[in-house]
Every structure is written in C-alpha cells, then in structure tokens.
Amino acid sequence: MGNHFIIIAGEEAGPASNKMGGIWNVIDEEAHTLASLFDSGKIKAKENTEILVAGPYFGHRGADWNRGLNRITDMEGLAPLSSDGELEKCLKTLESEGIKVFTGEEMAGETRIGYLQFQTSDYGKIRSSYMGKEMTLESRIKAEAYELLGLDSLKYESLPNGAEYTHYLSLSHSISELIRLLIGSAPRTADTWAEEGAGKDLIPCPGISLHCHEFGTFYAPARLKKLGIPINTVATLHATLPGRAAGYSSIQKRRNNDSTWPPGVPENLASLEALALYADTVTAVGESTRQEARLFYGINGIVIRNGITIESEKIDWNRKELSSPKRSSLFSQSPA
C-alpha cells in the first residue's frame, strides 16, 4: 500500500445535510484540524497521507432510516474525488458487491480531505451470498455479524428501532470492507493470525488509521479485529446509552458501582456500543462518560474532550434577547 489513509467515520460524517450538527461538527473539525497540523508541520505526515471522512448517504426523501429527520446529503459543493488507482479500484470492487459509495473532496489549505458516503438504504434489495446461500446483502451482513460477534440481528431488527440498528450495522460493515480491500488481506480469523504469529503481538498495518465516533460505526473496528486485520483503531464515546437512560441517577450508579442497566436502554444499539472494546484505544469526551463506559461495559478509556472552532467571539445580544422569552416559556409550561 503506497498511501497512508486516516479515516474518520461516524453516522453524521459527511457534507452537511439539512439536519446535521453535533457530532458532525466535531468530525468536521477533526478533519480540518488534522489538515492544518499537517500543513504547519506541527505533525509530520507520512508521504501520500490522505484524510478520508466516511459516513452515510441519504440521496432523497425517504432514504433516511429516520423518517422524522428526513436528512438529505448535499455534496454539490465538493469536487470529484481525485483518488489514485488503489482507492479507485477498491471503490469499484465495493460497487460490484452492491455497496454504492458517493465521493467528493475539498481542499483544507494544502491538504485534501476526501468524503466517502455509503448508501445503505438499498442493501435489503441487492442480491448477495454467504457461505454458499443466496440472500440479500443486508442478510449477508447480519449473518456474518452473528458468526463473528454473536450479534442477534433476527432479534434486534424486530425491535422498534430495528431500522436504525440495521443501518448502523450496514454502514459499519461497508467502512470495514473498504479497509479490508485497501489492506489487501483475505478474510481470516483472529485465531489464524495468532497461529501464524506464533504468539507474538500483531504489528498494526501502518497504511490505515481508523477513528470511529459513536456506536453507529463501532462494528467496523470489531469486524476488522475478528477478521484478523490489524490496523490502528480508535473508538470515541460521546455518551453511553445506559448513562443516557439513567439520566441524573447515573451519578449515583457510579458512586455505588452499580453496573445494572436502567430500564429503557435499547438492547440492539447497546450491543453495538459495547463493541468499542475491540478498538485499540477508546476515548471519552468527558470524565463522566469515561466512568460510565467502565461501569456498564468494562471498557477502560481515556478522556479527550471535543473541540470546535468558533469563528466569532462576539455575542449578538439583540438575537439573545429575542430568544430569551422563548426559552423561558419552554421551562415555565406546566405538564399536560
């Protein structure tokens, strides 16, 4: 592999749609900060280093798994992706497997940032096969996830948020499949690698680094680990699902070392969140999130806080005053 790819992945990783924000701002800032650090020489980039941002593609109304959000991905402001033969060949191979990727790029100073947007909405219609059996691509992904990690998609897809779970699994699979193709390794199990390495620690492939934000992409590093493809991986938790469900009582749970999950935790999404354990490094955006990950999942991580650039430090007081009554009314309303 001639290039070094830094891949930043997330459910909200891509050109801003009509509903993006939050984690998207963090991912976008990470990509542009890396580019500026490379340009300034503060971080010495390897020759032919490329930054790739990977996420979903919602091309039309109804393509989003969440009909309420109705996100539509806008890539009109991007130039065509000027990939070399290596990446282009892998993208064509993905397309032959039924995995459609929409691409683009922009320049951040002297550094190019590429965008890879995976369209998962058609995976239930595309024909594929797994272990000699004909099935849809979506079913193939679920069957392999069960074989590799015991993810019970038959159960998880029947839950009220089954469409969300299926989308995340498909997105993560697609990102990891691109990486597998880039590495050029045939699928193997971790046990096979261990036998060939005679018990020695695996040296991560220097060609790819993968940073996954939130549980929607955590199946990617887990799948790669199970296939025995040793790349550098980081999983970042912006919160934990059990912690969100517990609300303010999560403080008391941490004090009491009470690892039981509160009611209301979505089992299927939590099963994906727990896969952060397979990443080489787990980071949390705050100390409470780090403690929750250790309490609920047994994951030891480190704290690296989010940061975004604010272009203006001036407060628009007129706008603030206009918004104040609206905020006050929200808090003063009595419950129905």
Image (tube, rainbow, N blue to C red):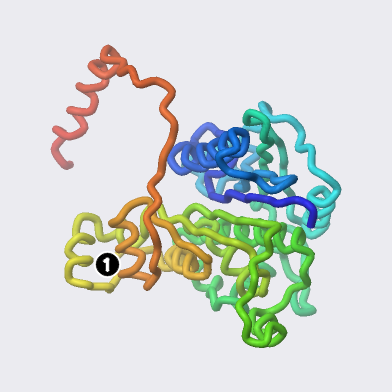
Is 13 located above or below residue 217 in the figure? above
What is the quadrant of the N terminus in the image?
A: bottom right
Above or below 328: residue 137: below
Mark 1: amino acid: Pro
Q: Residue at x 74, y 55 (%)?
A: 99
Residue drawn at point x = 69 percent, y = 36 percent: 112
Q: x%, y% of residue 75? A: 66, 32
Please say whether residue 210 is visible from this viewpoint.
yes
| 167 vs 37: above or below | below
Q: In this rendering, would 183 be left or right of 235?
A: right
Q: Badge 1, how many Cα within 10 Å: few under 14, some, many 20+? A: some
Q: Indicate the position of residue 300 as horizontal and vertical percent values.
A: 38, 68
Q: Quadrant of residue 128?
A: bottom right
Q: Answer left or right for 269 relative to 88.
A: left
Q: Nearer the viewer, residue 127 or 279?
A: 279
Residue drawn at the location 55% of the way across and 34% of the way down? 17
Residue under circle 1?
Answer: 262
Percent x, y for residue 247?
A: 24, 56
Element at label 1: loop
Q: Whole-percent x and y of residue 114?
A: 68, 40
**Residue shown at the point (49%, 59%) measured from the top left:** 235
Residue toward you, 56 or 157: 56
Instruction: Tell me the quarter of the picture where residue 267 sits.
Output: bottom left
Q: State left or right for residue 249 relative to residue 26.
A: left
